[in-house]
Image (spheres, rainbow, N blue to C red):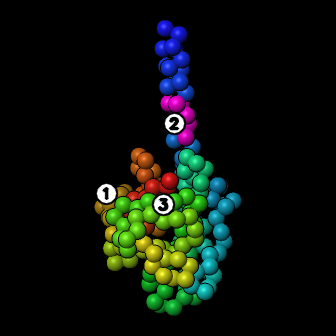
Amino acid sequence: MNCNRKVNAMWLVVLLAALVAQAGAQILTADQLKKIAPTSFFFAGQSAAVQLRNATGLKNSADKMVLVGLVDTSGYSTAIAEKYQGFLITEAKLGFEGATLDRTTLDPGEYGFGFNDGKFTVMNVAATDVLSIASQSDDQLKHPVPLKLEKDGAVYRLYAGRKYVVLKAD
């Protein structure tokens, strides 16, 4: 009987630890973002102002941050501005559903991104494509906004208007 109590107590501790870890994952609040989001982002040889009102982020259960935001691309060439809409800074490895270019994950780092022609493209800061994913459309979304993250079970949806991709922060 004493052995059963120890086993049950051990399982309870494991279960509580898992629940606490999952509870730590969260979408960042506007106040949290103001403290950590950059005011500008370097990409393709230039620095662009970040639109803080169109920025979002998350903290995963390991306390690693992912920040995403739109930038003012008015100083960029047309070729860059057509595919570059914002920044993605991640401390965690990101997994994406439907990724191509022989990659399904994105290592921690700083990237540019854009939603164009039915795709979500991630580029390194030299504007070279490193990941491309077919974006999906959520026609049922009641109030689309320029950029937001939504938790969807164990994954997150990154929305740009009604277009979105599904990602997981490991």
The amino acid pointed to by label 2 is Ala
Query: Is 19 a magenta residue?
Result: yes
Crowding at label 1, few (<14), some or many (≥20) Cα neighbours within 10 Å? few
2 and 1 marks in contact (CB < 8 Å): no
Q: Whole-percent x and y of residue 20?
A: 56, 36
Name the mark on residue 140. 1
Q: Residues within 10 Å of mark 2 (few under 14, many from 20)?
A: few
Residue underneath mark 3: 94
Q: Give the magenta-colored segment's residue range.
A: 14-21
Q: Amino acid at mark 1?
A: Gln
In three-dimensional space, the C-alpha distance between marks 3 and 2, rounded to whole angstroms, equals 20 Å
Task: Indicate which disc, 3 or 2, sits on the residue closer to the N terminus.
Answer: 2
Task: Locate residue 165, reporting x and y percent.
Answer: 39, 63
Which residue occupies 63% across, 59% down?
A: 33
For the residues marked 1 and 3, what is the alpha-carbon distance in whole angstroms?
26 Å
List the single residue furthest toward the front: 3
Q: Position of residue 122 (x, y in %)?
A: 46, 73
Please name which of the two marks, 2 or 1, marks the residue nearer to the observer: 2
**Which residue does the image show at 55% across and 27% down from the upper left?**
13
Crowd band around label 3 with a 10 angstrom C-alpha radius: few (<14), some (14–19), many (20+): some
Q: Amino acid at mark 3?
A: Leu
Precedes in sequence: disc 1 or disc 3: 3
Residue under pointer 2:
18
User: In this orientation, does residue 55 appear?
Assistant: no
Query: In the structure shown, which secondary structural element does the residue marked by tag 2 occupy?
Result: helix
Q: Are marks 1 and 3 in contact (CB under 8 Å)?
A: no
The residue sitting at the top extreme is 1
Going 55% across and 34% down the picture, which residue do you hit?
17
